[in-house]
Amino acid sequence: MTSALANTRYDRGVSIPMPPPPPPASQPPWAQVALPPRPGPAKWPTFVAVAIALVALGIAISSWFRPPPPDNKLAPPRPTPTFSTPQVADAKAKVCAACDRIHHAVLRNTGRNGGTDPASVLGLAANARIALYDGGQYLTKILAQQPATPADLATAVRALVDAYQELAVDYMAEANDTEIQTSFQTLENAGSKVSGMCT
């Protein structure tokens, strides 16, 4: 029987049992805990941003098509100041006195002769230019301090200021004789007009 069994063919896979499968490897503790599902991106900030943009767009459009307020509501007109006769007379006297003072200062500083000394000539020329320009600045200050000055006199004094300073700039820029003579004539005319109003 043994030889019969030895000569009989058999399937090795059927007759020899398979070894048991290996036990599953133990998992580390961190792998045993199930991770919660990752939430998707929050959507409410997007909705808030869109809502704010729509509100801003609506405000911009409504302000664009809103009619402008009438001109009389932008700023109330300033009342014209009124001055008494003594105030006007006092302002005129002070402005005329300032004009007379500057006239004499300009004459004193433009009528001097430095002779042949170049330093003296240069110094006197500088004084003349300062007298012309600063004289105009002084008259501008006096006009600002005397708002009751009559309008026609104030206009004439402003023209005199321009003439003083224009001649000063011509001297400083070393303008030609024709330009200086034109500025000098303008100054003479403006001064004569102011003098006529102040008499």
Image (spheres, rainbow, N blue to C red):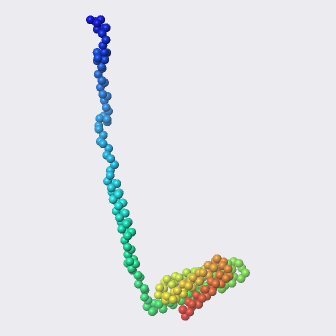
For residue 161, above or below residue 17: below
Going 58% across and 87% down the picture, which residue do you hit? 190
User: Is residue 115 or residue 48 the one in the foreground?
Assistant: 48
For residue 64, above or below residue 113: above
Going 37% across and 66% down the picture, which residue do you hit? 61
Going 33% across and 55% down the picture, which residue do you hit? 47
Pinpoint residue 4: horizontal percent, then vertical percent. 28, 6
Q: Quadrant of residue 97?
A: bottom right
In this rendering, the count of numbered labels is 0
Quarter the C terminus occupies: bottom right
Pinpoint residue 140: horizontal percent, then vertical percent. 53, 82
Instruction: Determine whether, in the image, residue 86 is placed left or right of residue 179.
Output: left
Q: Quadrant of residue 121?
A: bottom right
Work out which residue is located at the far bottom of the displayed protein and give it: 199
Quarter the N terminus occupies: top left
Pinpoint residue 122: horizontal percent, then vertical percent. 67, 78
Work out which residue is located at the far left of the displayed protein and give it: 1
User: Is residue 9 or residue 58 the one in the foreground?
Assistant: 9
Going 28% across and 8% down the picture, which residue do you hit? 5
Q: Is residue 15 visible?
A: yes
Pinpoint residue 125: horizontal percent, then vertical percent. 65, 80
User: Is residue 42 or residue 140 the one in the foreground?
Assistant: 42
Q: Is residue 16 visible?
A: no
For residue 121, above or below residue 47: below
User: Is residue 52 or residue 16 the one in the foreground?
Assistant: 16
